[in-house]
Amino acid sequence: MGGKSVNNSLQNFSQSSGLRRRSLISQRPEPALHNLQTPNAAKERPRIRHILSVDVEDYFQVEAFANEVPRRAWGIWPSRVVENTRKFLNLFERHGVKGTFFFLGWVADRFPNLVREVQAQGHELACHSYWHRRVCTLSPSEFREDVRISKDAIEQAAGVPVYGYRAPSWSITKDSLCPVFIRFATIYTVSLTRQDLLSSTNARTGKN
């Protein structure tokens, strides 16, 4: 009697467990079809586009050396800008990509062949000032003259118009914008940080 009771209990438990397992399995949601990976999934994803740009300046012309290497002494320092820029050109060519090369006017005046070489390989030429002076330290007239001579040096070397400008050391801010770009047919500037853009947008919309 005891043995039959145990066997019946085990059988009932097994049957009920089986029913419960089948019930739980039937309640599991089926995976959504749009989440399943397909062989062409990678091909269907949109390609990420990267914007490449190069500041064409020499190592001694950066703002960090402004107090150590005066601008009047630039000409006596050994230059590496041609060699280094060609490394970028070779790298870009190897990967089949194009970029914008922001030339210092001083560099364009001394190495016009480099300007033409960059342009001949299908890259965009743009302006990075002449003397690499921070815009926020210049008066409007000084800034205007700096843009003029830099733009002219690049255009004379390559024979093509220059439309872009990048300020040295991100020195154009919402407090130091100078309305000279249109006068010199400079259509765009790549000189603002994300914080500058947010501050400018908040000022226009009244947000703090």
Image (spheres, grey):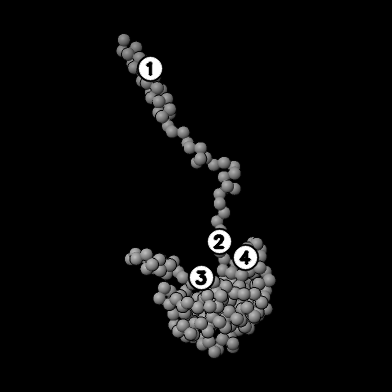
Alpha-carbon span between mark 1 and mark 3: 78 Å
Name the residue that disc number 2 marks: 50
- Picture disc at residue 142: none
Q: Secondary structure at mark 3?
A: loop
Tell which residue pokes out farthest to the top in this image: 1
User: Hey, which quadrant is residue 102 in on the image?
Assistant: bottom right
Name the residue that disc number 3 marks: 190
Alpha-carbon span between mark 3 and mark 2: 15 Å
- Of the two numbered discs 4 and 1 in the rendering, the one whose residue sits closer to the viewer: 4
Alpha-carbon span between mark 4 and mark 1: 75 Å
Q: Find out whether the residues at labels 4 and 1 contact each other: C-beta distance under 8 Å.
A: no
Q: Earlier in the sequence, mark 4 or mark 3?
A: 4
Q: Secondary structure at mark 4?
A: loop
Task: Count neighbours of disc 4 (C-alpha within 10 A) and say few if under 14, some if 14 to 19, many if 20 or more.
Answer: some
Alpha-carbon span between mark 4 and mark 2: 10 Å
Tell whether 116 sits left or right of 69.
Answer: right
Q: Earlier in the sequence, mark 1 or mark 3?
A: 1
Q: Residue at x 37, y 68 (%)?
A: 203
Residue 61 can be seen in this image: no
Q: Earlier in the sequence, mark 2 or mark 1?
A: 1
Say above or below: 29 vs 78: above
Q: Earlier in the sequence, mark 4 or mark 2?
A: 2
Q: Amino acid at mark 2?
A: His
Name the residue that disc number 4 marks: 98
Tell which residue pokes out farthest to the bottom in this image: 72
